[in-house]
Structures are given as C-alpha cells and as structure tokens.
Image: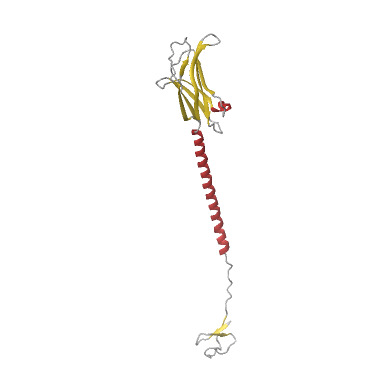
Amino acid sequence: MSKTCPNCGVNSPDNAKFCIECAESLEGVPINKEETVKKAPSTSSSDDNGSVIPCIIGIIIVVIIVVAAAAFIFNSGSGEETQKNITVTFSDVYVSSGNSISGIFYYYYYVNGFFNNFPEDMEGYTVKTLYCDKEDKELVSTTEKLSYFESSKDSKYDTMISSYSTPNYLDVDHVKVQIIKDGNVLNEFTANMNTNKLTQSSSSAPTNNSSK
C-alpha cells in the first residue's frame, strides 16, 4: 500500500507524512490499496492438445483411406490381367464319323487342346465352344465350367475341351472357344475344323480342311 503525492504524483510509503520526492505534506492523503490480481492458470497447453489430437486422428484416417484405395486398385488391376492371361492352345480339332453302338451312323466333333494360366479362383468362369459355318454363323455350341478342366492344369497331355455328336451332318468350318467370366467374354480363340477323318460313308462332308 502507498500514498500518492497530490503535488508530484510520486507514491510514498503509506506511513510517510511527507512526499519522498517533493516533501509535500501527505497528511490526509488516502492510502492506495493495491489489488492483488490472481493470475488465471494458463489453458493454452490443454487447448493446444485438444486441437492437435483430432488433427492427428484425421490424418491417420486419410492415410488409411488412401492405402485401402491403392490396394483395391492394385488388386483389381491384377485380377483383370490374370483374367486376360487365360489362353487356349489347340492340339486337334476334327470331325469323324461311324456307326454308334445302336448301329446309327453318327458324326463326332472334337475340340482338343490346352488351357494356360488358370486363375486361382475359378468361380464364375465358363468355357463356351461355338461350332460355326463358313459365314461364321453358330450351328451349335457347348458350355462347361472352367473348373471342370482343373484336373488338366499343368498337364503335358491335351484335354477334350468340347465334343458334339449328331446323326445329321453339320458343315462346321471352324470353332470358337470363349473364356467367359460372369457373362462377359474375356477372350476368344479360333481353330479350323479338320474333316480328313470322316469315313467314306459320309460322302456329303467336305474334305481337306485343317486345324490351326
């Protein structure tokens, strides 16, 4: 506490009778009561922590989303490439003829070959073989699940991809084997029909075609 000199304005001790600066009498001058100001505790640290934590969480979430999106795109692209890599190599595509067990004369159409690059998951894959004439018109077709041929995977021997028999001759010029996934044609492979194995009884059949 102190007294303020009315003459010069200098503060003197509260028990002083005269101003310490100008010697002015301080009798009757009121004593100044200094208020003790309590300093409020700083909250800046806690406030900073409160704003930083949500920011860090937000960054982590963004990073997780970016990584997940990148992984999804990579896996999708890899899957598409695997699908496109499934191929068919033909070994023998021909038609033969002869009497069946019942004595009826039949024509037998065969498509033999190899499947390359089987996918790990064959769910949804089918193999469709189309028997076509010279105008590329489909005469008949067969369909089988790709998983049916899994036993031939990595085999050095060819497998029968498709076969068809009929008592009525079909003038098949070529066949098309389609690899289908969920109704979409991923790849198509073509081979000519070999008629050199027809017997003399099938005089109406053309000859001298060869398979690709």
Residue, far top: 103
Height in image: 7 above or below 162? below
Give the percent coordinates (x, y) of residue 26: 55, 88
Along the line of sight, the residue nearer the viewer: 202 or 121:
202
- The x and y percentages for residue 15 are 60, 87
Is there any visible trace of residue 30 in the rendered image?
no
For the image shown, how many numbered marks are present on the structure?
A: 0
- Looking at the image, can residue 187 be seen? yes
Q: How is the image coloured?
A: secondary structure
Residue 75, image x, y percentages: 52, 40
Asked which quadrant contains residue 17, the reply is bottom right
Q: Residue furthest right?
A: 15
Task: List x then y, in percent, for residue 116.
Answer: 52, 30
Residue at (50, 33) in percent of width and height: 83
Residue at image point 55% right, 58% down:
52
Q: Is residue 36 left or right of residue 200?
A: right
The N terminus sits in image quarter: bottom right
